[in-house]
Amino acid sequence: MKKLSGGAIAGIVVAAVVVILAIFGISSYNSIVKSDQKVTEQWSQVENVTQRQYDLIPNLVSSVKGSMQQEQKVFGAIADARKDYANASSTKDKANATAEMTSSVGTLISVIRESYPTLNSNKQVSTLMSQLEGSQNRISVERKRYNEAVQTYNNKVVTFPKNIIANMMGKGTKAYFKADSKAMNSTPSVDLDTDSSSSSTSGK
């Protein structure tokens, strides 16, 4: 059997390296694309559930506002949060606005249950409150899934050697759906004892 020359061996080695690099590149590319698509899919779910909360809020507000004239601070916070959400463009802005909506609506529901027994027992109001609480739970679930998808994606695009392929693809890290502490603690303060005494007429 004829021995291969040094040049031939070198050529085979180079070819093998090229094949290995090509396989790695294709595999990494497909992996990054798949993770990117997963993030996009999960973001759609987040937007769906947050939009549902956004759409449900006016129904509850219109049902109770006439009987809760002294709660303008709460209604104002809700209106501001919805406006912020409608104007939000970045993931961070949407996360902050969603947290503000969830917080202010949670305050409204608490006030109704604590200080407005008649409204609380109203079937339509009770149904709307349950739907909003259900939406808030779904937001929490989808937010967690989205952040997990982002973490998986980010790990791929910053970790060597896949980060080389990611850079060639123009892919960078994505933002988590996480609100600032200020937005998460934006609940308007309400004195339930005072409200209870002042709403004895409107809540009955």
Image (cartoon, rainbow, N blue to C red):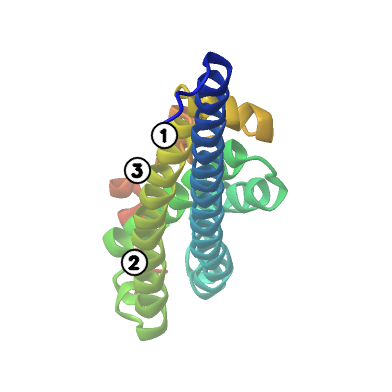
**Coordinates of residue 6 in the picture (x, y in percent):** 52, 14
Residue ID for mark 2: 116
Q: How crowded is mark 3: few (under 14 residues within 10 Å), some or many (20 or more)?
A: few
75 and 194: which one is in front?
75
**Coordinates of residue 180 in the picture (x, y in percent):** 48, 30
Decide if residue 172 is in sight here: no
Say which amino acid is labelled 3. Asp
Say which amino acid is labelled 1. Asn
Mark in the foreground, 3 or 1:
1
Q: Which of marks 1 and 2 is nearer the N terminus?
A: 2
Q: How crowded is mark 2: few (under 14 residues within 10 Å), some or many (20 or more)?
A: many
Q: Which element is circle 2 on?
A: loop
93 and 112: which one is in front?
93
As drawn, the residue found furthest toward the front would be 1
- Where, quadrant-wise, is the N terminus in this rendering? top left
Q: Earlier in the sequence, mark 3 or mark 1?
A: 1
Q: Which element is circle 1 on?
A: loop
Residue ID for mark 1: 185
Residue ID for mark 3: 191
Q: Which mark is residue 86?
A: none
**Coordinates of residue 122 in the picture (x, y in percent):** 35, 82
As drawn, the residue found furthest toward the top would be 6
